[in-house]
Image (spheres, rainbow, N blue to C red):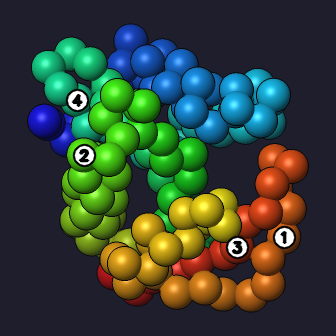
Amino acid sequence: MDFKTISFGSPQYQQSLALRQLVLRTPLGLILSEIDLRNEDQQLHFGIFDQAVLAACVVIKPTNSGAIAKLRQMAVASGFQGKNIGKILLKSVEQALKEHSFSTIELSARTTAIGFYQKFGYQIKGQQYIEQSIPHIKMTKVC
């Protein structure tokens, strides 16, 4: 398994779009929209690859403050779930963000994923809300 930066517009980026659609949107009866993809050319994209196969991916949106990174659209392919790939991706992304001088990571966690993020030191901030038709909660972690 290899952690790699994914270049916007590359074939690997297209794979990440397909994976995000399959894992995050199709089960909800939704599609990745232009709004979801807006400004992705200005965001960071990472993936875990098994040979040339994309096992997991995530998008990082730098905020205006420059010190906070928003983790979004994390997805693990069904054939790789339950094999610590999410953990490997999250830890690798956290290290990459430290190297890019980010001090805080924030994310909107599906309520079903709260326990996963809490295991890695993310803390709940605020109240539950609906996003993409399902419950989410804001979580943060200082790098």
Q: How many angstroms separate mark 4 from mark 1 (CA)?
A: 33 Å
Q: Earlier in the sequence, mark 3 or mark 4?
A: 4
Residue holding disc 3: 137
Q: Residue at x 22, y 29 (%)?
A: 49
Q: Earlier in the sequence, mark 1 or mark 2?
A: 2
Q: Residue at x 73, y 65 (%)?
A: 136
The amino acid beneath tag 2 is Lys
Q: Earlier in the sequence, mark 4 or mark 1?
A: 4
Q: Residue at x 50, y 26 (%)?
A: 19
Residue holding disc 4: 49
The amino acid beneath tag 3 is Ile
**Residue 13, quarter of the rendered image:** top left
Q: Earlier in the sequence, mark 3 or mark 2?
A: 2
Residue holding disc 2: 83
Q: Earlier in the sequence, mark 4 or mark 2?
A: 4
Residue 90 point in image, percent of width and height: 33, 59
Q: Is residue 105 left or right of residue 5?
A: right
Q: Mark 4 Cα within 10 Å, few/some/many (few <14, many 20+)?
A: some
Dot 2: element: loop
**Residue 10, quarter of the rendered image:** top left
Foreground tag (1 vs 2) = 2
| Picture quarter with the N terminus | top left
The amino acid beneath tag 4 is Phe
Q: Residue at x 30, y 66 (%)?
A: 94
Do callouts 1 and 3 mark residues in contact (Cβ within 8 Å)?
Answer: yes
Q: How many angstroms separate mark 3 from mark 2 (CA)?
A: 25 Å
Q: Which mark is residue 129?
A: 1
| Picture quarter with the C terminus | bottom left
Residue 46 point in image, percent of width and height: 35, 41
Dot 3: element: strand
The amino acid beneath tag 1 is Tyr
